[in-house]
Image: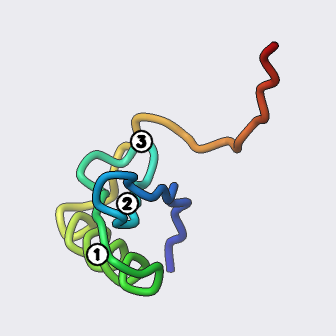
Amino acid sequence: MKTFTAVVERCPDTGLYVGYIPGFPGAHTQAETLDELQENLREVVKMLLEDGDPVLQGEFIGTQMVAVG
């Protein structure tokens, strides 16, 4: 079993959740609920892995708070 870290955001225009896996070309999707987004990401990654293991173009490290002012 392989594990990937997904970044999840909410689109302010549509209200949809948007998820993507940093550095994994094509590994992105959207959905109305977080559960649906998780399933959509799982399906997209399964499909992409059919072509072989990805060569990730980046690696998710984490998040940082940035104070300005």
Q: Which residue is mark 1?
A: 46
Residue sitting at 50 percent across and 80 percent down? 1
Dot label at residue 30: none
The answer to whether mark 2 and mark 1 are in CB contact below 8 A is no
The furthest residue to the top: 69
- Counting residues from the N terminus, which is met first, the one under dot 1 or under dot 3? 3
Badge 1 amino acid? Lys
**In this picture, residue 48 sits left or right of residue 56:** left
Q: Quadrant of residue 16?
A: bottom left
Q: Quadrant of the C terminus?
A: top right
- Counting residues from the N terminus, which is met first, the one under dot 2 or under dot 3? 2
Pinpoint residue 45: horizontal percent, then vertical percent.
Answer: 31, 69
Task: Establish if 9 lies above or below 38.
Answer: above
Q: Which residue is mark 3?
A: 23
Pinpoint residue 52: horizontal percent, then vertical percent.
Answer: 25, 61
Badge 2 amino acid? Val
In the depicted view, which residue is nearer to us: 2 or 27?
27
Q: Secondary structure at mark 2?
A: strand
Q: Which residue is mark 2?
A: 18
Badge 3 amino acid? Gly
